[in-house]
Image (cartoon, helix red, strand yellow):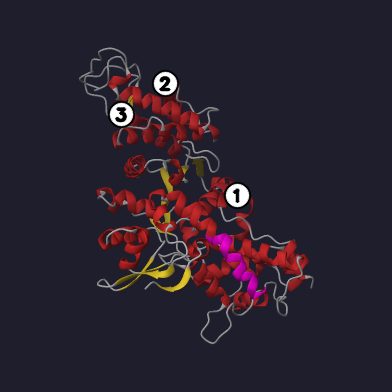
């Protein structure tokens, strides 16, 4: 076997789901979580960053034709890649949750009409909905999602902000709309004295959409992913937008044929509920993505066996990813060394890999493991090209030293592109630990950071919340341990600070 040729012709995939949409199906195992989502039992998918929410979203989106046979019509409310559809809202954002609720509802009504038209659902309700939207210039048509959203938001502003209109504005006592606003879509039910037959509430538009979907014997799913990107520039904006989204989600549960499918990071959900969110207890159709040792082993095996060069060299077929755990362990053992650090008390190679790609919350995200595999492949190919030793033993593809050489790149990217990028206010506190020991106390941190012990405790707690520190010790004598995944990037020294 020419190991160099085998690895040179191998690829372990992209760590970000959006970059490998066409290949996801070949890697994917249909877990119970996927089956529940696919058959419609789940509406909200939570998971830590990199745990596979976008993979589930992408797979669901890619199976539109298959789902259509089961009477399910899909539409995405956010671009699956590239610029977010919400990018224009950050410059002049909605004032509060009330505006966001109105925005979400009208946006969803417009998306649903577009979905009905695309699927050839022509009925009285579709036509009535279309006329109401067309009158206000809110038909989806050939508009991009960003263009449609911009139009919807301009309409909401005109309806809910009297100051957006010129001059002194009189408020209609029945509709509570500014008299100067000529729109026929309102965001509360029309009063009894209203005589305008064209006046519709946005809830009535959603009801029309629901009746149209129901009359066709179908169901409509609106998919929302990348919400961590959509409102990342402002935490207050993000909180208002997502709290409003969940209120709208709960409102739409009253419609039998419409469902909102939300893919959201667990830490963002915690953020929007930290000050209390009464509606949270009513969000029951959800699941949280989690990964254990066996599922991560399966991920490695599937991505390895996806390569024809590997399957040919080891005389296996790509179905090894569906074999028993014992058989998968055996396949893994043929390709990887038994241990990275040899010794009776040292972990197996798989456990070593998992410990090196785990954060301070003890979460193993597939994203980092996939990145590690790609980095490992590059490190070993480079060793082959430079004829560096030791060669991998027996039929193994990877030498022990290559596994250690793969870590720095993963560490650097995780620290800079995740923690630094998402938590800029904490960046200086992490950077200042460069070259320090891996285990710290409040007193040692206070010395490094040149703050009081109480201030150091507060900062350390914040760093625990984002997974940079793993809390250890006791409540009376806390200690903070930096997980392996950040050590290479900061050049940390193994041991406890004095």
Q: Residue 164: x and y, percent?
A: 32, 20
Give SS at disc 3: loop
Which residue has dot 1 on it? 19
Pick the quarter of the image with the C terminus: bottom left
Using the image as rendered, state which of residue 5 and residue 67 is in the foreground. Answer: 5
Splitting the image into 4 quarters, where does residue 41 fall?
bottom left
Residue, far left: 173
Which residue has dot 3 on it? 187
Q: Is residue 367 left or right of residue 460?
A: right
Which residue has dot 2 on it? 136
Residue, far bottom: 344
For marks 2 and 1, give the CA distance.
37 Å
- Write down the region rendered in magenta: 399-411
- What secondary structure is the magenta-colored segment mainly? helix
Q: Badge 3: how crowded within 10 Å, few (<14), some, or many (20+)?
A: many
For marks 3 and 2, give the CA distance.
14 Å
Q: Residue 192: x and y, percent?
A: 22, 23
Splitting the image into 4 quarters, where does residue 109 fall?
top left
Give SS at disc 1: helix
Query: Residue at the location (55% across, 70% down)?
Result: 353
Q: Residue 484: x and y, percent?
A: 49, 68
Query: First in sequence: mark 3 or mark 2?
Result: 2
Q: Badge 2: how crowded within 10 Å, few (<14), some, or many (20+)?
A: some
């Amino acid at each position: 076997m020419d190991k160099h040729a085998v690895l040179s012709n191998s690829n372990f995939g992209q760590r970000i789901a959006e970059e490998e949409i066409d290949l996801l199906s070949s890697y994917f195992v249909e877990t119970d979580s996927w089956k529940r989502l696919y058959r419609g039992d789940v509406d909200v998918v939570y998971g830590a960053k990199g745990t596979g929410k976008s993979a589930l979203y992408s797979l669901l989106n890619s199976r539109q034709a298959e789902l259509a046979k089961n009477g399910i019509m899909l539409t995405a409310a956010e671009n699956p890649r590239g610029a977010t559809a919400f990018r224009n809202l950050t410059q002049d954002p909605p004032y509060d949750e009330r505006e966001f609720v109105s925005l979400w509802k009208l946006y969803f009504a417009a998306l649903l009409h577009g979905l009905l038209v695309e699927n050839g659902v022509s009925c009285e309700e579709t036509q009535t909905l279309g006329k109401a939207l067309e009158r206000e210039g809110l038909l989806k048509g050939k508009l991009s999602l960003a263009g449609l959203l911009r139009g919807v938001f301009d309409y909401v502003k005109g309806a809910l902000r009297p100051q957006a209109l010129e001059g002194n504005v009189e408020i209609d006592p029945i509709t509570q709309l500014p008299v100067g606003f000529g729109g026929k879509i309102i965001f509360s039910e029309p009063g009894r004295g209203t005589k305008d037959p064209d006046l519709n509430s946005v809830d009535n538009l959603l009801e029309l959409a629901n009746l149209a979907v129901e009359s066709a014997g179908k169901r409509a799913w609106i998919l929302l992913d990348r919400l961590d990107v959509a409102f990342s520039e402002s935490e207050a904006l993000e909180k208002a937008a997502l709290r409003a989204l969940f209120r709208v989600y709960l409102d739409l549960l009253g419609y039998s044929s419409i469902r909102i499918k939300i893919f959201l990071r667990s830490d963002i959900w915690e953020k929007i509920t930290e000050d209390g969110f009464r509606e949270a207890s009513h969000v029951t159709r959800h699941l949280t993505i989690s990964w254990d040792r066996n599922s991560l082993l399966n991920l490695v095996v599937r991505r390895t066996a996806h390569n024809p060069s590997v399957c040919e060299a080891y005389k296996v077929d790509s179905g090894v990813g569906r074999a028993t755990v014992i058989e998968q362990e055996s396949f893994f053992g043929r390709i990887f060394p038994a241990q990275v650090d040899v010794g009776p008390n040292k972990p197996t190679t798989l456990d070593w890999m998992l410990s090196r790609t785990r954060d301070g919350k003890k979460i193993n995200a597939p994203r980092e493991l996939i990145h590690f595999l790609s980095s490992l492949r590059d490190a070993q190919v480079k060793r082959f090209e430079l004829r560096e030793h030791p060669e991998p033993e027996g039929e193994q593809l990877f030498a022990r030293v290559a596994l250690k050489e793969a870590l720095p790149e993963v560490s650097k990217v995780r620290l800079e592109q995740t923690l630094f990028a998402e938590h800029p206010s904490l960046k200086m506190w992490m950077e200042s630990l460069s070259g320090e020991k891996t285990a710290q106390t409040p007193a040692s941190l206070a010395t490094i950071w040149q703050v009081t012990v109480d201030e150091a405790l507060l900062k350390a707690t914040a760093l625990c919340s984002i997974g940079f520190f793993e809390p250890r010790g006791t409540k009376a004598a806390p200690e903070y341990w930096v997980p392996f995944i950040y050590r290479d990037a900061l050049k940390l020294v193994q041991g406890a600070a004095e």
